[in-house]
Image: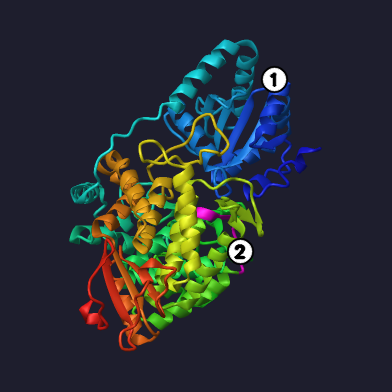
Amino acid sequence: MGMANRLASATSPYLLQHAANPVDWWEWGPEAFAEARRRDAPILLSVGYAACHWCHVMAHESFEDETTAAYLNEHYVSIKVDREERPDVDAIYMQATTAMTGHGGWPMTCVLDHEGSPFFAGTYFPPQPRHGQRSFTQVLQGLSDAWVNRGHDVARVAGNLREHLNEQAALPAGLVDREVLDNAVIKLRSEFDMLHGGFGGAPKFPPSMVLEFLVRHGSHDALAMVDDTIEAMARGGIHDQLGGGFARYAVDGAWVVPHFEKMLYDNALLLRVCADRRTPMAAWAGEGIADFLLRELRTDEGGFASALDADSEGVEGRFYVWTPAQLVDVLGPEEGAWAAELFSVTDTGTFEHGASTLQLLRDAEDMDRWLAARDALLAARSERVRPERDDKVVAAWNGLAISGLTRLAAWLDEPGYLEAAMVAGELLLDLHVVDDRLRRVSRGGVVGTPAGVLEDYGAVAAGFLDLLQATADPRWLRAATSLLDTALAHFRADDGGFFDTADDAESLVARPRDPSDNASPSGLSALLHALVTSSAVTGDPRHREAAEAALTTVHALAVGTPRFAGWSLAAAAAMLDGPLEIAIVGPRGAQRESLANRARHQPTAVVVVADRPDPAIPLLAGRGAIEGRAAAYVCRNHVCGLPVTDPADL
């Protein structure tokens, strides 16, 4: 079998991009390790993802190069992994890379023994030596020599690293109470960029999970940070001013020039913040994200694709940037000059090669003129060569998108957004749930083999619970509680925290467990949200107790580095609020709508809206309309006040 065939059957578009390489790639799995033992060769592990710029560079320089490939094929068994498909493999070897080199990143390049223990790790390696860095080939030759001639050294390094990876630092448990949350806000305030919003300097990432916590905390200081950040980002070049949606990060501290890849998880999380914040600026940014998701990331099956590349025609950002002359070409001399001024498109350019990103640093006086220009430019841009799309559907990120869309749909009364969320929910339920277990990825309606990790269980269950709140359809509750019960049975650790992989998942050199949020929520924090909501709807004390116990394991993180505990802190805010459990039951219409709208003003509240009582949903059991009008039943810890029918009484 030529190797062009071995990655050709992969689910991952990233692996498919390497199917024609001269490198004899294997997918991660027992077959590759068996081959390494048979040949007594070390394993080269290369980890990346489709929207990763430097991954493409290294692939082009080294993996497409016949000489490099021939050396690899002779001396190594080479394994390619998509980190988005196997976050467990990525997490363990990234921990090793950081331990060995002091920093991490992608492409990640590790060399492993037959047990999967790494004895060398790094990131990008150039094809020729430069700046004192050895070339990729020199590195490969040195390691092959060590493998053949200095086996005891290799074994020692591998053994030390294996021990290091398995030292589960015991996390000191502690209560995450109101004081911890208030102090987190103070600490975040000290790291806040007063000038441009956001936290830290360049590169600057959208702090969506921290913003969600701040919205829920609700203090004046917290909301000021949220509003300043949403406005600065929405007006900046990181926001696609024509098509909506946000890029992954800005290379500068003022959100002017993004790294142009657009990820589903960022946009889903920001959508949620906008829907929960409910300001005019949040409405503009949120609607733009929702429209972008539906227009550019929806797959034929109704799921949401993972990402859009930064590059098109081999040039980063080309699809998104403009020169003054290009604006004039589309809009004519007068409107073109006006648009250049409005969007900060300069003669020298704010990006590269005289081109500029589009910013909207002030509102246009004439909204109709602005909308006409935007529509004309969007239409012209759609003629350009589009960036590639990574069209695999990742369960966790689709769960986050479902949550964001349902919440925005409820606020803006946009049934199209709810419909899209329901279709994505159906896809996850029909395709990704296999024998009561969750699979992480699918593509083209075919489910992949990788097992769901904790983040998948948490975010998908939370998405199903948001659909329950919007539709009062009890099958979303059944699906969510089934996933949560599986998570409690298979992912729980002895200290009340959670591992990121199931107890019966493929065993790696160490079992990954990381409570800190990264680009997307940690498995633990994703699960917390779902457990809290589920117990609010059902009154199941097991789910609440599991959430309380798990929350104590993030105490050190919440106190020390709240920027990496935003999603757990957001769940903690809901737990301290109760959360309020609100059933709104009765005939559809303006009065029910305004009850629901008033109830949802509290971002942590769990609000189920239904036409009639339903014994299959405990929060709705025996709760009906009053004298033909919708009634709101407000409960905390399942103790309820008298029902009200007048929104003012809420």
Residue 7 left/right relative to 549: right
Q: Position of residue 489 (x, y in %)?
A: 47, 44
Query: What's the residue type where badge 1 is placed?
Result: Asp
- Residue that numbered label 2 is attached to: 299
Query: Looking at the image, which residue is at 64% across and 56% down?
Result: 443
In terms of image quadrants, where is residue 27? top right
Q: Callout 2: few (<14), some (14-19), or many (20+) C-alpha neighbours within 10 Å?
A: some
Q: Position of residue 356 (x, y in %)?
A: 46, 60
* Residue 94 sits above or below residue 429 on the image: above
Provide the residue span drawn in magenta: 383-396
**Viewer-proximal residue, 222 or 599?**
599
Q: Amino acid at mark 2?
A: Thr
Determine contact: label 2, label 1, CB under 8 Å: no
- Which image quadrant for residue 298? bottom right
Percent across and percent down for residue 393 are 58, 56
Instruction: Report the quarter where the C terminus lies.
Output: bottom left
Sooner in the amino-acid sequence: mark 2 or mark 1: 1
Quarter of the rendering occupied by the N terminus: top right
Which sits in the foreground, 538 or 524? Answer: 538
Classify residue 149 as left or right of residue 169: right
Q: Left or right of 497: which side holds 312?
A: right
Asked if residue 384 is among those painted magenta in the image, a careful observer would answer yes
- Disc 1 designates what residue? 40
**Residue ID at (63%, 40%):** 59
Q: Secondary structure at mark 1?
A: loop
Give the label on residue 258, or none: none
Q: Is residue 71 visible?
A: yes
